[in-house]
Image (spheres, rainbow, N blue to C red):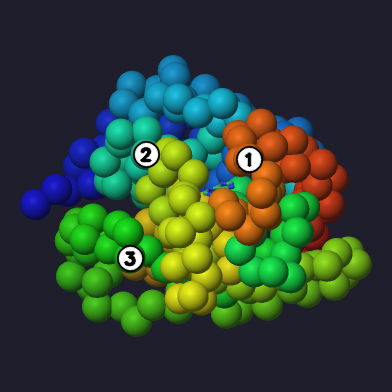
Amino acid sequence: MLNIKLKYDKLLNEIKAMAPFNPELAIILGSGLGDFASNLNTVKEIRTSELCEYPVSTVQGHDGKICFSEYNGKKVLLFKGRIHFYEGYKLEECILPVHLAKELGCQRILLTNAAGGINPNFSPGNLMINTSFNSIFIMNEITELIGIASKEEKDRSLDFPSKAFNELIEKAAIKENIQIREGVYWYTKGPSYETPSEIKMIKKYGGDCVGMSTVHEAVYASVLGMQVAGISCITNYAAGITNLKLSHKEVTETANMVKNTFERLLKSVISLL
Ligand code: HPA
């Protein structure tokens, strides 16, 4: 069976040698949300392309940088750019940032993503706390992935997503007077957007938004005993919800439009840690 610690031992040591401190929170920045890094004091920036075994990011808007940053006395590890299953990587590669975050000392991980809105009350630009996840499209792969966790890790009861962490995000939103939605994040593999018929099915089964990431990262983080939360930026109406054609350009444009609100929310979350 795959031993993820062994597989990434060299890479981890390479990063540890450059790490200026042990971070307490990791944040994975989703599509178009990478600019958040410029809000914090960057103590050390590492280009993932300079690391020996780090998967290459192939998606526009995913920079490929790891930043050790500080804000309000809090130490944060930022992943600018994520590794997607639809890029052809194995799940064990997609969850690499989670593994690194845990090994570098993070107790918490915040997963951000861009997603298509399904809930009729949502519109592009809304931010949504992920109250639950659905991953039936990759359930088999996730089960295999959990196979790489140790016995003790598998036996933990999962607080997934973390109620305490979600409450902290809600508090942060209230403090900043930011309207925050709540709902179920539903995973599809991509890279193409869903068909209107798929969206109809997902809606029927309780999905509030849809995206191509996050769920396996969240499962793995919770198996490792980390507090995990997810925030979706609703960047577009999901396929068939309106007659509009979906595009990656719209996703990045909307993410850009809500950038300031999203950044205020994340800074408030960090301050409340
Ligand atoms: N579907 C899947 N992933 C997405 C979407 C969508 O509509 N928007 C942003 N990421």
Would you say residue 226 is visible in this rendering?
no
**Which labelled disc corresponds to residue 86?**
2
Measured Cα–Cα span from mark 3 to mark 2? 15 Å
Residue that badge 1 annotates:
245
Please give the residue where the numbered disc 3 appears in the rendered image: 136
Q: Position of residue 113 (x, y in %)?
A: 58, 50
- Image point (9%, 52%), residue name: 1
Which badge, 3 or 2, comes first in the chain's sequence?
2
Identify the amino acid type marked 2.
Tyr
Distance from mark 1 CB to nearest ligand 1 atom below 8 Å: no
Looking at the rendered structure, the secondary structure element under dot 2 is helix
Camera-side residue of 115 and 61? 115
Q: Is residue 100 above or below residue 210?
A: above
Task: Identify the residue at image location x=60%, y=78%.
Answer: 164
Relative to residue 272, is residue 95 depicted above or below? above
Q: Earlier in the sequence, mark 3 or mark 1?
A: 3
Residue count near mark 1 (Cα–Cα under 10 Å), binned few <14, some 14–19, many ≥20: few
Mark closer to the observer (3, 1): 1
Viewer-nearest residue: 198 or 39: 198
The reply to whether callout 3 and callout 2 are in contact (CB within 8 Å) is no
What's the residue at 36%, 29% (across, down)?
55
Asked if the residue at tag 1 contacts the one at tag 2, i.e. Cβ–Cβ closer than 8 Å, the answer is no
> Mark 2, residues whose alpha carbon is within 10 Å: few (<14), some, or many (≥20)?
some
Q: Is residue 233 left or right of residue 141?
A: right
Q: Position of residue 263 (x, y in %)?
A: 78, 48
Farthest residue, direction left: 1
* Mark 3 element type: helix
Tag 1 secondary structure:
loop
Between the residue at mark 2 and the residue at mark 1, the CA separation in whole angstroms equals 21 Å
